[in-house]
Amino acid sequence: MLAVPMTVTYTARVANARFCGFSKLLLAWKGSIYKVLYKEFLAFFAMYTAISITYRFFLPDDQKRYFEKLAIYCNYYASLIPMSFVLGFYVTLVVNRWWNQYTSIPLPDRLMCVLSGGLQGSDERGRLLRRTMMRYASLSALLILRSVSTAVFKRFPTIDHVVEAGFMTREERKKFEGLHSPYNKYWIPCVWFTNLAAVARCEGRIKDDHTLKLLLEELNGFRGKCSMLFHYDMISVPLVYTQVATLAVYSFFLVCLIGRQFLDPEQGYPGHDLDLYVPIFTLLQFFFYAGWLKVAEQLINPFGEDDDDFETNWLIDRNFQVSMMAVDEMYGDVPMIERDRYWNDSNPRPPYTAATLFVLRKPSFQGSTFDMAIPKEEMHFQPLEEIAENMEETVSRHPNMALFNRLLNAAPSPTGLMGGALRRTSAQLQRLHHSPNTDPCNSDDDDSESCKIGKGGSLPSGLGQDTQSTICSFREEKSARVPLLDIDFHGQAADTTRQVDQSIGEESHTREEEEEKTEVSFPSGETPPDSAIPITPQHHSAFLFHPSSSRLEHCSSQPIINHHRVVPAFAQPSLGQHTMSFLTVPSIEPQRLRSVSMGSELTGT
């Protein structure tokens, strides 16, 4: 007699969505919420009725007034219990654990296929090896299920029952009991399996090491699932979590026994205008929340004997019968190979019944964009040269927008580097606003680096990077342009000149003493270049220019690559000349370079 799975299955009844499709399931009794909850529901309703009768017929008036105040108090503070929050997380945890336990049940299907194809030999010795190894795997699964499932333990309460059922021989029982260990010994049959696999490899029945490796990997996966079942049984949901969820539900409805009572309408309490005797919505609330807790109670251990628990005895019977058939009766049993009915058909199409002809009327799915329509004028390829020219024209028309786009793309952090990059961009835009000619590419030197900003329409590469500093480049005047000193800065130039003159006057004595102490050495036989000057450690240099000899070409941001590079110096004009310090760059200190653009410090060698 075959065992029938007792789990409630209703999948076929809800295969198609229809009007009130789940309503037909509400009348089922086995595995239903009514069967699980009706005792608690009747107990709650009985206690509510007893309190209501006592309030209405047995309490004097003064005690009624006191009870009414107590009921209002309980009803007000009952909402502070976070029942939905606690129950939601708890039931979600239990349902996930329930399904993970089912996926951890060891199934022999993969192992039996590898064993049937890997261990060769149709003689009695080969058949004995295959059947014994498969029986060891089934024995290991039986031992672990016997340890975690009450239904399996009731079926096999002792090892004698396991021997009598044919999963273990008497000699194997002696070996099993002779191995003394204080822990669960479900893994011993798996070790016997590996030993027999090694014997079969030595006998040549397993042809190569790859097949042996594959067989042992499948066995390890099988044993791993047995181990997971054991650990799920040992490590439960934390007890405190279960207690919190249970106390939240029970305390809430104990308070509701008093707080949800219908009070005397003549007293005029707010919300107590009706006296319905039966608390319909309170009973529904109990049905839902208490039923939710019952779901967790039923699923927290699916290896029991509830209606929806796993039918482990049926799994044992199915796995043992199927595995033995696969490695013994079906070994080498291959049907006669012949041509199929679509042998000469390049487009085979299985037939349809009259009930499934509607499938042929549906077009084959080709992709979500298969029927997408595009105008013909937008389907022509465009030459890459024209695309590049259009991009350059767009950038040249909107240089400030290009600056911000490059800034947003290059800035790695909106908190640290972005702030410095925005400040530098703001300063550059101010210079572009005050300068009458912002395009440095109007000079004759079209191949210079300064033309890259005008043509490329992007920020210098130093924006948004810590390891770069702003360096102002100068060149001799090649074309007639408006000097910067002729531009009206609304008094800012005069103020800046006075500040620079005052700073130079205060530091002139210190600078002369340090320049005498500092020397730059050159190899013998070589003369220092005209533009080379010694760099002093405490020298606060400033890029100053004459309006007649040189002018500010542009301000580019370039990375400092060579830290030992000699910096060219411009002749410092006298204090009486009309000069303006456009940009002040801190000096190069020993072992440290300061970035003007970002304010960061770079350590040099």
Image (tube, rainbow, N blue to C red):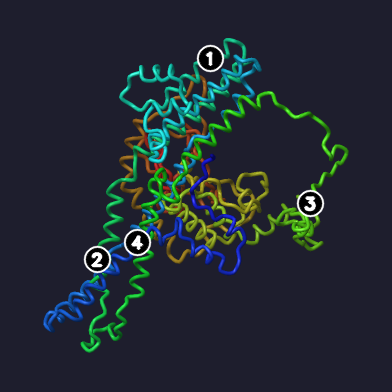
Q: Which mark is residue 254?
A: 2
Q: Marks 3 and 1: CB-CB under 8 Å?
A: no
User: Distance between the Cα atoms at labels 1 and 4?
Assistant: 56 Å
Q: Is residue 224 above or below residue 100?
A: above
Quadrant (top left/top right/bottom left/bottom right) for the N terminus? top right
Q: Amino acid at mark 2?
A: Leu
> In the image, what residue occupies the spot 27% across and 61% down?
250
Label 3: which secondary element = loop
Q: Using a 10 Å C-alpha cutoff, classify the residue at mark 3 as few (fewer than 14 neighbours), some (14 to 19) or many (20 or more).
A: few
Instruction: Of the two numbered discs 1 and 4 on the same chain, state the one appearing first in sequence.
Output: 1
Instruction: Of the two numbered discs 2 and 4 on the same chain, state the one appearing first in sequence.
Output: 2
User: Distance between the Cα atoms at labels 2 and 1?
Assistant: 65 Å
Give the residue at mark 1.
Answer: 198
Q: Marks 2 and 4: CB-CB under 8 Å?
A: no
> In the image, what residue occupies the spot 53% across and 57% down?
484
Label 4: which secondary element = helix
Q: Using a 10 Å C-alpha cutoff, classify the residue at mark 1 as few (fewer than 14 neighbours), some (14 to 19) or many (20 or more).
A: some
Q: Which mark is residue 383?
A: 3
Label 2: which secondary element = helix
Q: Amino acid at mark 3?
A: Pro
Q: Amino acid at mark 4?
A: Ala
Q: Amino acid at mark 1?
A: Ala
Q: Is residue 149 above or below residue 169?
A: below
User: Distance between the Cα atoms at labels 3 and 2?
Assistant: 79 Å
Instruction: Of the two numbered discs 3 and 2 on the same chain, state the one appearing first in sequence.
Output: 2
User: Distance between the Cα atoms at labels 3 and 1?
Assistant: 68 Å
